[in-house]
Amino acid sequence: MNSCYANKSDLFIGAAEEINNSTYFYLAVPHSAYYSCFLWMKHLCYSKYGKTENEIKNEVDPTMHGTHEIMAEFIRMRLYDSASKFEEKQRAKEFIAKIGQLKRIRFKADYGEESITITQSMKSIELAKDVLKILKTI
């Protein structure tokens, strides 16, 4: 069950790693790393669960705005609801914490006035790989 979103996700994480290895391009890494995760979430929502954006929003919270937040919460709910053990419930918490951290770094890179350091660039790749590892177990 591969979709264009899954393929794009793989391309974005590969691009993030390649860009990170290039000097002075750290600013672009968090964006690519984050979107790799976001596209995998879209893949799960649309391909695995067969949901439309409106169906997802209604399941999560009809008053909630922002596709990114809605999809992340939908995935967190699915992880938590399917968990039968404490460790699996912790995975849902880890997912939402790490995607949140990654999104903050991406937001800073895309819209902030300060520069992104190599440390932040590397952290965004680490977070993305952790998130993707969780997402790919669903």
Image (cartoon, rainbow, N blue to C red):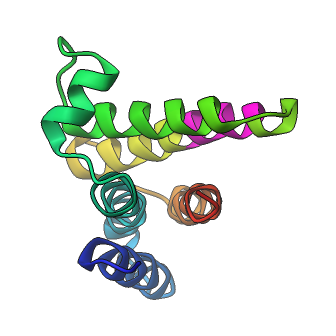
Viewer-proximal residue among 17 and 54: 54
Does residue 95 show up magenta in the picture? yes
Write down the quadrant of residue 12 in the picture: bottom left
- Quadrant for the N terminus, please: bottom left
Q: Which residue appears at 20% of the width and 34% of the height?
A: 55
Residue 30 sits inside the magenta stretch = no
Residue 75 relative to residue 71: left or right: right
**How many numbered dots are placed on residues in this image?**
0
Q: Residue 111 placed where, x, y %?
A: 20, 43
Q: Give the range drawn in magenta.
A: 89-98
Q: Quadrant of residue 129?
A: bottom right
Q: Main structural element of the magenta stretch: helix, strand or loop?
A: helix
28 over 12 or under it: above or below: above
Whole-percent x, y for residue 73 in the image: 42, 30
Q: In this view, does 28 lie to the left or right of 129?
A: left
Work out whether 105 lies above or below 19: above
Residue extending furthest toward the top: 63
Q: Residue at x 63, y 56 (%)?
A: 134
Left or right for 108, reference 83 = left
Instruction: Please name the residue shown 49% across and 59% down the image.
Output: 117
> Quarter of the image holding residue 114?
top left
Q: Residue placed farthest to the right in the image?
A: 86
Image location of residue 132, percent across then percent down = 56, 63
Please say if 77 is above or below 23: above
Residue found 36% across the figure and 84% down from its top = 11
For the C terminus, the quadrant is bottom right
